[in-house]
Image (cartoon, rainbow, N blue to C red):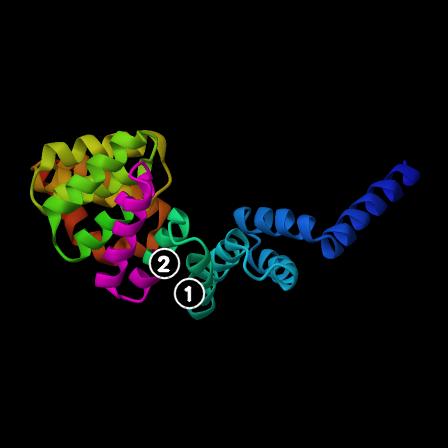
Amino acid sequence: MRKYFIFIVSLFCLNEAFAQTNPEAQLQQGTAYVNGGNFQEGIDLLSLYLESDPGNASARYYRALGYYNLKDFDNAMADLTTSLATAPQFTEALDLSGLIHMAQNMLTEATNDFTNAINSNPEFAPAYLNRAMVGKIKKQYSQAVADLDRAITINPALLEAYYQRGVVKLLIGTIEPALIDFNFYIENVTDRPGAYVARGLAFYQDGKYAEAAADLEQALQLNPALENDFKNIIEFSRSNAGGK
C-alpha cells in the first residue's frame, strides 16, 4: 500500500511538473483550473503559457475569466482587449466584456458588448440573458422579457433565465406568469433564498398569504440574515392566512 501511495504521489508531482514546463499542458491545465473555480492557479499557468504565445485569444479569454472571478477587472479587460484584437468575433470574450462593464455600472457599454456577442453568434443564449439583466436595471422591461424569451427558446435548460424572467414579470405586475417561472425554477433549484423571496412576494401581491408566508419562511431558513427585511410581511401574511 505504501509503495502504491508513493507511486500516486510521484505521478501527481510529475504531472504538475509537466504542466509547468509544457506549453500545451499549461494551456489545458490552466483552462481546466479556471473552469473548475481554481482561478489563481489557472491564471498562473495561463500566464506561463502566454509567455510563449502572447497572442493566443483563447488563453487570454480564460485568464480574463479568472481575473473577472477574482474581481480584478482591469487585468481582465486588458486580456479581453488583446483577445478581441486577435479574434473580433470571439463571442464569449464579447460577453465577458459586457459582464465586466455591467459590474462597473457602465450599462451602455455592457449593452453594446452583449449585442455584439449576439451579432457574432445569434444562438448564444447567455448573451440574451445578460442583456436582459441590463434591461432590468434600466427598467426596460419589455426588452428584457423579449431577451429572456429568446434565451429560453435557444436553451430551455438555462434556469437563470426563468428566474430573471419571473423577477421582471413581478416588477411589471404580471403575477401569474411570474409564478409559473418561479415554480419551474424552484423545482430545479431548491436552495436559493432569493427565489423563495421572489415567489413569496408574488404570492403576497396576489393575496395568497399562506403561500407567501411559507416561501418567505423558507427563505429565512436558508438565509437568516433576511429576517429584518421580511419580518413584517411574514407576520402580516400569517395573520391574514388565519394562523400564527
What residue span does the magenta drawing correspond to? 99-128
Q: Main secondary structure of the magenta part?
A: helix
- Residues tagged 1 and 2 counted as in contact (Cβ below 8 A): yes
Element type at marker 1?
helix
Please provide percent x and percent y for residue 188.
35, 31
Percent across and percent down for residue 72 are: 46, 67
Q: Which residue is mark 2?
A: 97
Q: Is residue 156 left or right of residue 6?
A: left
Residue at position x 26%, y 66% in the image: 106
Q: Say whether residue 127 is visible.
A: no
Q: Is residue 47 left or right of residue 82?
A: right
Of the residues shown, which amino acid type is indicated by label 2?
Ser
Q: Nearer the viewer, residue 66 or 213?
A: 66
Is residue 109 part of the magenta span, yes or no?
yes
Query: Relative to 17, is 168 above or below?
Result: above
Crowding around mark 1 (Cα neighbors within 10 Å: few <14, some 14 to 19, many 20+) is many
* Furthest-bottom residue in this view: 74
Q: In the image, is 225 to the left or to the right of 176?
A: right
Residue at 26%, 33% (x, y): give it.
152
Mark 1 highlights which residue?
77
On whether residue 30 falls in the magenta region, the answer is no
Amino acid at the residue labelled 1 = Met
Quadrant housing the N terminus:
top right
- Mark toward the start of the polypeptide (1 vs 2): 1
